[in-house]
Image: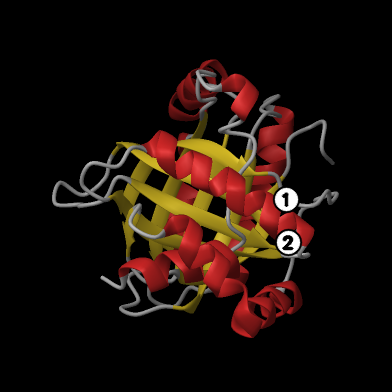
Amino acid sequence: MKKCLTVAMSAIMFLSAGATLAQDEEESAPLSFTPVEAYACNFNEGKGPADLAAVVKDWNEWMDDEGQTQYFAFTMWPTYYGQRNFDVAWFGVWPDGNVMGAGSDHWLTEGQEMNARFYDVLDCVSHTQFASVQMRTPPEREMASGDTFVVSFSDCSMEEGKTFDEYAAAQAEWNAYADAHGILGGAWAMFPVWGENVDADYDFKAVGSAANYTQLGANWAKYASGHYQKSTEIFEGLLDCDSPRVYTAMVERVMADEE
């Protein structure tokens, strides 16, 4: 793995992380986790994005009719990747575990017909649940179904003898630096809970977002002009991360109070 360089690239190109997790005045503040589910899927023979869009339209109407309003969803399409393992990914987010549990029960008991519609289009090779911690709040933006953004994922592990608290403190330092230099975006750490591959070898997924590729490119330009040096200084020796993968994300559903 490309250790210090990859960590620096992840931090600055994919929008780094920061202040909400580790603040000097709240050294022992507990982490706040959000439940996230992820499906990795391939299209069945003869099916494609238009078929999925038709199912999603009907699913959104079904969710509204069933009163399932506290669920945010987006699809994710590979842009920069090594070995391509799926055609499209589906990410779903609930506000908390109670809503997740109730929503899952409702889907399993009432949503089987709709579920079959999805599986007529998709063959999903995995279904994983994560506990997500927001590390940096992205710039404020009203999101609606059909909106797009850019998201990146990198599998990371703490170096021997290092702790997540140390990483969070470094992220907070970088976050302040990024804010001061106009490096924009959001970031999360996603810890695997259920359904990950048994041979998976990482502590968490470092996730970053950008509003679009223009913003991503602007961050890249700032990084290349020399800001990578500060990132390397802050993160050196903390993490071992693999190469980030970049995806185009499309919002499929927003929570009731967001749209």
Q: Quadrant of the N terminus?
A: bottom left
Asked which secondary structure carries label 2, the reply is loop
Q: Amino acid at mark 1?
A: Pro
Q: Residue at x 75, y 55 (%)?
A: 179
Which numbered disc covers residue 138? Answer: 1
Location of residue 164 in the rendering, given as x and y in whole percent from the top left corner? 38, 38
Tally of marks: 2
Tag 1 and tag 2, C-beta contact below 8 Å? yes
**Quadrant hosting residue 214:** bottom right
Location of residue 69 in the rendering, given as x and y in whole percent from the top left corner? 71, 29
Q: Residue at x 82, y 38 (%)?
A: 258
> Compared to 146, does 103 lie above or below?
above
Residue 247 visible somewhere in the drawing: no
Q: Amino acid at mark 2?
A: Leu
Asked if residue 148 lies left or right of residue 201, the reply is right
State the residue position of label 2: 184
Q: Nearer the viewer, mark 1 or mark 2?
A: 2
Which numbered disc covers residue 196? Answer: none
> Compared to 31, does 184 lie above or below?
below
**Quadrant hosting residue 235:** bottom left
Asked which secondary structure carries label 1, the reply is loop
> Compared to 122, does 214 lie above or below?
below
Q: CA distance from mark 1 to mark 2?
A: 7 Å
> Compared to 123, does 192 lie above or below?
above
Which residue occupies the foreground of this view, 136 or 36?
136
What scheme was used to colour the molecule?
Answer: secondary structure
Q: Residue at x 48, y 62 (%)?
A: 233
**Quadrant hosting residue 108:** top left
Q: Residue at x 61, y 28 (%)?
A: 24
